[in-house]
Amino acid sequence: MDSKRVWVTTGLSILSVATVITATPWILTFRDNAWSENPASWGVFGDYIGGTLATILAAFSFLGLMYNVWLQGQAMQSDRELRDDEIYNKQAITCLERAFNRVYREGSSIPIRDRTAWLDCARFLLSADKLYDKIKSDGFKVMYESEREYWRWKFADLFEPVEDFEVSQQPSYFDGPIPDEKIDHSSIYVIYSFSTWQKDQPDILEKVMSDGGDLNMVSKKYRGAREFLSRSARFQQRVIER
């Protein structure tokens, strides 16, 4: 049922109820009297119905107006929250990008080793978390979480101990040659914990594979992939040739 029909039905229902409420006391009071042929008596009845019914309808109209005002207020509040969520989401993603750029050097596969840079990076990551906590709508939450995982992978790749960066496996790497260059403990924790996949973050691939897989979803032209997948127990039970 569309909104216009709902409003028409509601209005007719209110009018019917109001009429019944108005007429019932008169009928109960004068039900034993014969129908009057005097126009003046019907005038009194008309004055009673008009005055009483108008008052009831005015009360319903006022309530309806208040309800409409409340609905408009709710809609405006929802619009404001969505606009705020959009701002929080964009700013949080910007913080993630700034955090990465603060420790990333173009053309280098290892992060910048600089106390200030690591501190700034950690602050940007924490700011992103604070902005995310302000987001209320599920849509923007999902959007940010997806973007956050992208940057998590970027951080994981950058801080992966390979080649020259293998030295970071040693605690002495964070001390630095002089005390002023010592990497701050809090920044180390924030950055490396962000770069680590946490147990409370489900991997969407796990759900896909836990439900099994239908090999028919993979085109037969990908013969090598199909043959490899067919060896898996997850696919062997669901192979149905079309």
Image (spheres, helix red, strand yellow):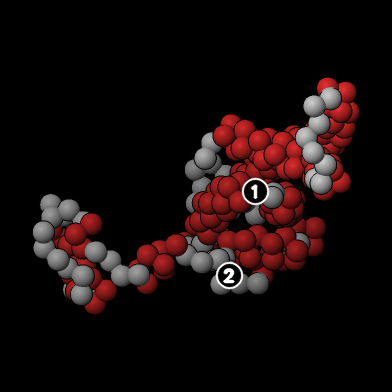
Instruction: Give, as a three-letter code, the residue at label 2.
Output: Asp
Residue occupying the point 84% across, 37% down: 56
Q: Secondary structure at mark 1?
A: loop
Crowdedness near tag 1: few (<14), some (14–19) or many (≥20) residues, C-alpha within 10 Å:
some
Above or below residue 155? Residue 83 is above
Residue occupying the point 44% across, 62% down: 204
Above or below residue 201? Residue 32 is above
Residue occupying the point 14% across, 66% down: 240
Q: Position of residue 132 (x, y in %)?
A: 69, 51
Q: Position of residue 67 (x, y in %)?
A: 78, 39
* Residue placed most toward the observer, 108 or 129: 129
* Residue placed most toward the observer, 103 or 70: 70
Check disc 2 and report the residue beneath it. Answer: 200
Asked which quadrant contains residue 186, the reply is: bottom right
**Camera-nearest label, 2 or 1:** 1
Q: Looking at the rendering, in which quadrant would you find the C terminus?
A: bottom left
Q: Mark 1 or mark 2, which is nearer the start of the sequence? A: 1
Q: Position of residue 107 (x, y in %)?
A: 49, 43
Disc assigned to residue 63 = none
Check disc 1 and report the residue beneath it. Answer: 137
